[in-house]
Every structure is written in C-alpha cells, then in structure tokens.
Amino acid sequence: MLQATNLRAEYGSLVAVNDVDLQIETGQFATIVGPSGCGKTTLLRMLAGHQEPTSGTVELNGEDITYTEPQNRPTSLVFQSWALFPHMTVRENIEFPMRNNGIEIGDRVEELLEQVRLDPDVHADKQATELSGGQKQRVALARSLAYNPDILLLDEPLASLDYVLRKRLQRELADLNDELDMTFIYVTHSLESALLMSDKLFVLDDGDIIQTGSPEDIYRQPNTKFIAEFMGDANVFELDGVEQKGGSYEVQSSLFAQTTTVPYHHDHGEPKYLVVRYDDTAVETELTEDLGLEVDVENVLVRGNTVLIECGSPAADGEYVAEMPVDEFRATNIEKGDTVFLQWDSAKSILVPE
Amino acid sequence: MSTIETLRAEIDALEGDENPVRRLLSPPGILIAPMALLLLCMFIGPMLAIVVFSFQTGNAIALNPLEWSIATYQEVIGGMASGEGVYGDVLVNTVAVSITTTALTLIVSYPAAYALAHKITRYKLVFLMILIIPLFTSVNIRVFGWALFLVQNGVLESIVSLFGVQEYASLMYRRSTIILGTTYIYLPFMLFPIYLSMLSIEDTTLEAAKDLGASRLTLFRKILLPLSKPGIIIGSLFVFVLSLGANVEAEILGGGSIFTMASNIQYSFGYSQNWPLGSTQAVGLLLITVVAGVVILRTIDLREIAARGD
Amino acid sequence: MSTKHSSGLGDRFGDGLWYVYVGLVALFLMTPLVSLVIASFYDGRFFSIVDYEFTLNWYEAALTSGSVRGAFTNTVYISVPVTILSTIIGTAAAIAYTRYEFPFREQFKLFALLPIFFPLILLGLGMSMWASQINLGYGVVPSIIGELVWISPIVMFVVSITALGIDPNIEEAAKDLGADTVTLYRKILLPLIADGVVSGAIFAFVLSWNNYYIVSYLSGPQSTITTWIHGRMTQGFTPVVPAVASLIFYVSILLVIGAAVLEYRSVDEGE
C-alpha cells in the first residue's frame, strides 16, 4: 500500500501541492486527474523521488521513502516524452535498468517486449530513434517494467498519440495492470482515460484533492460544480431556493418552472447547482418529462450516431445542450430556430455545492 | 510530527553549510568550478588590470590610490573632443571604419542569409562550409591573402592584365582597403546570426503572407524584417565591437599609415611603451564591448538554436 | 494554367539569382585564401596567370626551415594542451548550464560566454599586463592559459547546443531505472553529447592553431606559426610565407570539415 500524508510542494510563494493525503492499495490502477497546472505532475514526481516535498511523508508498505533517491526506490516513472535513450537500441534500453539492479537478463527482454505486444524479432535490435510514437511508448513501458518495480508511475504517456492508438493502449495498460499485480498510478488531464482504466480516481484542482472514489461514483455524484463540469458534457443550472427534505432537497430555479426533489447526501454544504448531463436530456415540442425549460434551438450538430442540439434560453443568457440519438431527433421534426422544451427525468439530476 | 520535520530540515541545512567542500565536489559545483576559476583569474584579472593601469603614471601600479591620475584620460578625451592631433584622426578613422564595416556586412549578409535559409536547397552544406572556413583561419593569413591579391604584381593585377588593362593604381594602403579587409574578416559574424534568425521563420509563414496578398515589399517590411531583428542586432553589435579592435587589417592593408584605435593601442604598448595611455584607450573599448556582449547574450536563445538544429 | 507555368519558370529564374548571389559572397570569402594557395605554388616574384610556373620549392623551404620548425613546435605545444583543457572546462560548464538547476544559472552563462565577444586585442593586452603583475611571465604556459579564456567559452557554446537538444527527462529516467551518478555520465550523458564534444574539441584546436592576438601578447620570445607569419609579413614579401600560411590553412580546413560533418550528423539523428 502506498500512502502519502500531508504531502506539500511549494515553489517560492506558489503552493503546487497543498497537504495532499493519498492512499493506494497494492495492485490498484489509480488515476490522478485534473486540469493542466493543477499540481498533478509535481505530485507524481514526489512519489517517484525526483522532487523533495516541502513537507509531508510518502510511505510504501509502512516504510518511509519520502527522501529515498529515485534509483533506490521501487517506483518507475514512464515519462510523457518517454525519455528513451536515443543512442541505444531497444534491447539496450530495456537491459539498462536490469544491469543497474543486478537482474539476470536471459530471455527477459523478449518476454517484456511480448508483454507490451511488440515482436522481439522485429524490434529488439532497432535503434530507439527508429520507432514510431506508439512503439516508443511500448518500449518505455517495457523498460520501466524490466526491474519489477512495486509501483509504475505514468505521466500522461499517451498524450501525444493519435486517438485510435491511444484507445488501444489504454485498454492494454488496464490489462497489464490485471496481469501483473503491480500498482499503477496514472496522471492525466483527460477524462476518458481516467474513466476507462482506473479502479480509483483522485481529482486534483489547484493543489488540492477535491474528490476521491471509483470513476463511476465520481461521475454519478461529483462533489463540486468544477468536477461536474470537468467530468463531462453537462448543463449547469444555478439554484434559487433549496429546502432539505430528509435525504433529499427540494430545489427551484428561475431557469425552469417546476420545483423538484432530488436526493443529495454529502457534507459539502447546501447544493448550489443542479447538473444534468447532455445525454440525459432531450428536446421536444411539448413538455413530457417532469423537469424542463423553454429554449430556442440555435444549432444542430451531428456527432456520429447522436445529435447535439445547442439551445439558448430566452429567460437567461445561458447556453444549454441536449444530446439525442439521431433517429429520435429526426422523429421530432425539430429544426434550427424552433422554440422547444429541453427536458429530462428529474431523477437524472445531480445536485452539487459550489 | 512537525518537530521531527523541522529537525530534519535543520540537520539538512547544517550538513549543507558545514560541508561546502563536499558540495563543491559534486555536480554541478565541480563542473562550474574550472570555468569560474579560469575566468576569474585570467579574464576578470586582466580586465581589472586594464582599468587600474589607465589611472597610473608609469608602467607599474602605484599602491597608494592618491597617486593615481586621470592625465591620460584628459589627453585622450581632450584630443578626441577637439578633433585635432592623433586622437582626432584615431576617432574619425575608427568610427568610420567600424560603422562602414557594420553597414557593408549587413547589406551583403542580409540577402545571403535569407537565401541560405529559404532559397538554397542544393549544395547547402557546401555553401555553409565555404562561409564557415574563413572563421577558422588566422586573421593574419586572410589579410595576407588579400595583400597577395591586391598588391602590385599580385593576383588581381595579373587577372586584370588579361583584359588588357595596363594602367593600374595600387589598391593598397588606403582607408577603403582597410574597410575591405574588416568587411571581409567580420562578414561571417554578421551572416550567421542573421542566418539563424532567418531559419526560425517558417517557410509556411512566408507562404501564408504571400497567400494573404502581401507584396514583396510588405513581406520584407512586415514579416522578414521584424522576425530577423534579433539576428540583425546581434550581428551588428558583434561586427561593430570586433572591428573596433581590428588591428592586423590596418597594419597590413593600411601599411601602418592609417591609425585606428586598435593600432594606436598596440602602438602605445609596443613602440612607445606607455601602458597607462594604451590602457585608457582600451578602457573605452572595454566598456563598449561589455555592453554589447551582454546585449548579445541576452538576445541569443541557445535553446532556440538547439531546437533549430543548425 | 499557362500563367502558372510561366510564374514557375520566373520563380526558378529568381531562385537561380539567389544561388548566383550566395555564390558571389562565397567567392568573396574565398578570394584571399585562393590567392594564398596560388601564390604558394608560384615560382617567381611576379605573378602572371599566362605563364604560371608551378613549384613546390616554397613548401620544401618551409618544411626545412629551422625557424618555421621552431614556431611549429611551439604552436603544437600550445594547441594540444589548449584543446584538451578547453574541451574539459567547456564541456563541464556546458553540462552544468544545460543539465542542472543552480542559483545564478543564467548569470553564470552570461559570464562564461562573455569572453567570446571580446576583441582579442583587448584580451591579449589585458592578459599581458596582468601576467607581468602576477609574475606569470611570458612563454608557452601563459599562452595556453590565455587562449583557454577565449576558447573554453566557445567549446561551452558548441557543447551546450548539443546538450540542449537532449530530452530534459533523460537523467531522471536513468536515475529512475537505477543508475548512479557514474553510470549516468558514462552510459547516458557523455555518449549523448559526444558529437558536440568532439566538434568542440576540433574547433578548439583550429582556433588555437590560428590564434594570433593572444599569443602575440603572451608568448614572449617564443614564436609561433602565426607570430612568425606576422613578423615576416610586416618585413616585406618572402615567398616562403604563403607556403607556411597555406600549410596551416590546409590543416584547418580538413579539421573544420570533419567537425561540421560530425555536427551535421548529430543534428540529423536528433530529429
């Protein structure tokens, strides 16, 4: 188990990581997600030992490793730029950590390459500079795995790859995590990576961990408006009146006509916003659901097999979006310029504090 | 817990302070030390020597600063201000040579740098080599080569005589010949900075400008000139400062008949053995050099040069 | 269609003009060197392209002359140590500047590279006075130290450019994979900047080989090739001088081409 306690990093007067607590079980795939500049790379570098924290401790299975040098620490970092040694072959790159740590080489290079799905016969003796982006990423991964670290740290290593390749490698990383019984800590600003691969998610904003949990929990019940917006395409309505009713709140807003009751159970203060995801909403000429508002259709965008309907509200100057399957939308005969009802099942609403 | 931390921090601080030797012996301290030591002993020292000697009355340093004098400054500045005597000539010659050299090298280099960066594709390495090689050949040798070319019965005369020209005035020992020499010697120092800043302008930027209807003149004034400005600044300062220090050119091509600052400094040290007078003139050169050097180094971005890979 | 075609032709003609212009600049830069080489093979006191008489006599005279040989030996005694020491000093400073964080890093760069921009006459005469004040004296050793001041910064500049092209994470990656400091330098850092170091060393040798100003102030009674040439030059034309100068030039040109090829190759690989 990896445990960070009160971990803090300051650059002069700037606090990059603000007394963060972190607990990751052995074998877990944990993701630290947050916008750029939120301190996630600094946090990762402190876990890897490349940066000394201003204060706080890092413990691995009960042993304090806060000030252990990176070369003596059972962690391995896969860099965003991969940092392959350009003057070495793939094989030499992978043998490098094994030689440093006195591990017998044998057939291990071939094994590792197969593990990251590269053909050893084709790639082992290529120069590192001859590889494509995806291949470099795989070699960097194999090199990091080569000396069996307890923890693999990944600093957005997929960021510069194209969409299809990124998807495939995400899947492979998750599979590898299952196979290896090794803790993976992945840092990213991309929501799709975070949701797809992780067992546990840490949302970092401005140096603070603002929510921890499984991807599904966080997606379903974001702690703050920031997380709600960050986690995905969502409409946000400011609430005017809230009243607690047991485990739920009765809320109203000038933006939609109805009063509605939504479950809300956490201790971050009273709800301030009602959030509903694009794909939970629909537009129709009549109000058929129990929650909705009147809007003008401003634009219709086809996104694969769904349609994004961008709407403006005459009552407020906000912009709201509904996402519907293409066929369903076609059936409504709604066109740009129509006045319609953007609506959703009130049970799909999510309440969040500030 | 926080007491343990503060204790640890204090111990770390103590170790660092107590053991400066160890810190100096590990990187980057040990990597910086030789260069810093060398420059302190043999660069800062000599430059201080120039400044101190400029205030002396003889070829030795008086330990009592009250005996120092500004007589040489009065002589040099007075002479330059009145424009009479040798210092008047020196000032006029030096400024004329340096400014003309800077202007000429700029005019010759700018189109060449543009062409090398954006037009020349074939034999580019060959061209670059030819432009680099003079930089690595002794000033003496190059100036001597010009003398062989220009001198009576020299290479130029024998070429010209092929075309039946017999009346031939010697081109040696004129101010314009010195300028030819300095322009030649310092051309690469103008060409390469401008070439590097031209390289940073993407071909697509130029294409985009043309695409957006920019005429050749607009392209030059609004795109090329502003983007190559760092190179022009660096090159001009470089050439100006270095040509202030040009001595061999004046000596060989000017035949010792035309005095510039550098040759006058050399004369003060060599023939007349008047160190304070030579130092005073050198202090002027030193001030200009330091200012120009700092401006150049602040304008150069090594990282950008590395990224461009040339 | 046809207009497009003709503008293409016009462009090609325009491009041709650029080649002609750069060719002329190159010709200008080569003129004195070519004159030198022509003169070095010419048998006689007066040039004539029509009845040029080729001879190797002057080279023979140059190679057998005792004073040339003495000057040559002195030059080697200065250039070789300068090359070795400036390569070490310049490379170390370049590694510190490009691969480490430390206080006053930018100021260190500014200070260390400043001598490059100094007119050599200024460095030479300052050193000359300084040498007399600190009793360093004049001769081969003071010349070596003096040239180091100008050449080490140039090596630092050349190596820095190579070192800045390396992925900034490479040291951290190596440490992460268990490398200690010695392994880091031996297996990773030094091999990666090797090309830059070699071209820096070649530049250092060629610049030292050709240095005149600093040596003329610090070598004292010892003459080097460049001070020898300078002395003969100012005393009027002696036909052996072009031969000696040409010999120096041939060595320089070979080394510079070698260095440029190396630099070009490493840049190519870096991309």
Image: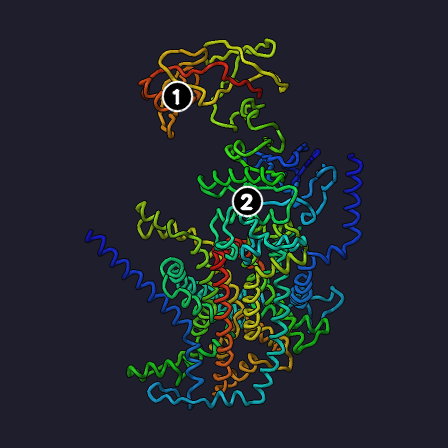
In the image, C220: left or right of C46? right
Q: Which residue is mark 2?
A: A80
From the viewer's side, name the closer residue of B57 and C66. C66
From the viewer's side, name the closer residue of A178 and C131. A178
Q: Amino acid at mark 1?
A: Cys
Q: What chain does mark 2 sit on?
A: A
Q: From this view, report whether residue A144 is shown above or below residue C203.
A: above
Does the image show residue B43? yes
Q: Amino acid at mark 2?
A: Gln
Rendering colour mode:
rainbow
Does the image show residue B254? no
Q: From this view, report whether residue C98 is shown above or below residue A66.
A: below
Asked if marks 2 and 1 fall on the same chain, the answer is yes
Q: Which residue is mark 1?
A: A311
| Count of numbered circles on the image | 2
Mark 2 neighbour density, 10 Å: few (under 14) some (14–19) many (20 or more)? some
Tell which residue pokes out farthest to the left in this image. C2
